[in-house]
Image: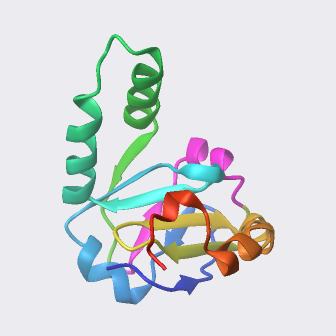
């Protein structure tokens, strides 16, 4: 399970050091893809394969489903962390997420999110009240 928030730096070669506590879970390979809200999503390879299998079962006659599958497949990059726990983020991924040197890696239970630090701070400030209220119908009685 991926929990917590970390603030690694992106180096000049586009490498990001993953938090040490997540490295064992990701040692077998990981998939980096475009996430929600212009973040990047990082899945352990096996969890991403489950997601890809569900996505590929979507009806190809549905234009929205086709667009989602195309974006998911074309926007995904397989990575293997190096000995220092670093992954290299593609220039397309860095551009999509607006990544600068200061980044945030945030746990999201079964995957990680990578954000530009300024974008993360803006997002969390904007969404704090909704979290505190916890009343959105999509939460379905979680709280």
Q: Is residue 55 above or below residue 124?
A: above
Q: Is residue 37 left or right of residue 35?
A: right
Magenta stretch contains residue 103: no
User: Which of the pair 28/137 is nearer the observer?
Assistant: 137
Can residue 82 be spotted in the picture?
yes
Residue lying at the far bottom in this picture: please name it. 21
Residue 95: say if magenta: yes
Q: In the image shown, does 25 or 108 lie closer to the viewer? A: 108
Q: Is residue 124 visible?
A: no
Q: Which residue is painted at 73% across and 68% down in the image?
A: 127
Q: Which is nearer the eye, 141 or 5?
A: 141
Colour mode of the rendering = rainbow
Residue at 55% of width from left, 58% of height from top?
137
Which residue sits at x=29%, y=27%?
A: 58
Q: Which image quarter holds the N terminus?
A: bottom left
Q: Position of residue 131 (x, y in %)?
A: 65, 75
Residue 72 in the image: state x and y as whole percent. 41, 37
Viewer-side residue, 143 vs 57: 143
- Residue 94: % across, % down: 62, 51
Q: What residue is shown at x 53% (from left), y 70% (from top)? A: 16
Question: How many labels sit on residues?
Answer: 0
Which region shows up in magenta?
Answer: 84-99
Q: Residue furthest top?
A: 61
Q: Which percent across, then down, holds residue 129?
A: 76, 75
Q: Which of the 4 image quarters holds residue 135?
A: bottom right
Q: Quadrant of residue 39?
A: bottom right
């Amino acid at each position: 399970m991926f929990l917590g928030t970390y603030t690694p730096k992106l180096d000049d070669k586009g490498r990001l050091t993953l938090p040490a506590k997540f490295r064992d879970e990701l040692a077998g390979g990981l998939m980096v893809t475009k996430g929600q809200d212009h973040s990047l999503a990082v899945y352990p390879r096996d969890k991403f394969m489950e997601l890809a299998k569900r996505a590929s079962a979507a009806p190809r006659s549905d234009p929205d489903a086709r667009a989602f599958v195309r974006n998911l497949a074309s926007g995904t990059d397989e990575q293997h962390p190096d000995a220092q726990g670093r992954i290299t983020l593609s220039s397309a991924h860095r551009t999509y997420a607006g990544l600068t040197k200061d980044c945030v890696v945030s746990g999201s239970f079964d995957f990680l999110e990578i954000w530009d630090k300024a974008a993360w701070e803006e997002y969390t400030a904007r969404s704090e009240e909704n979290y505190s209220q916890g009343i959105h119908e999509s939460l379905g009685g979680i709280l």
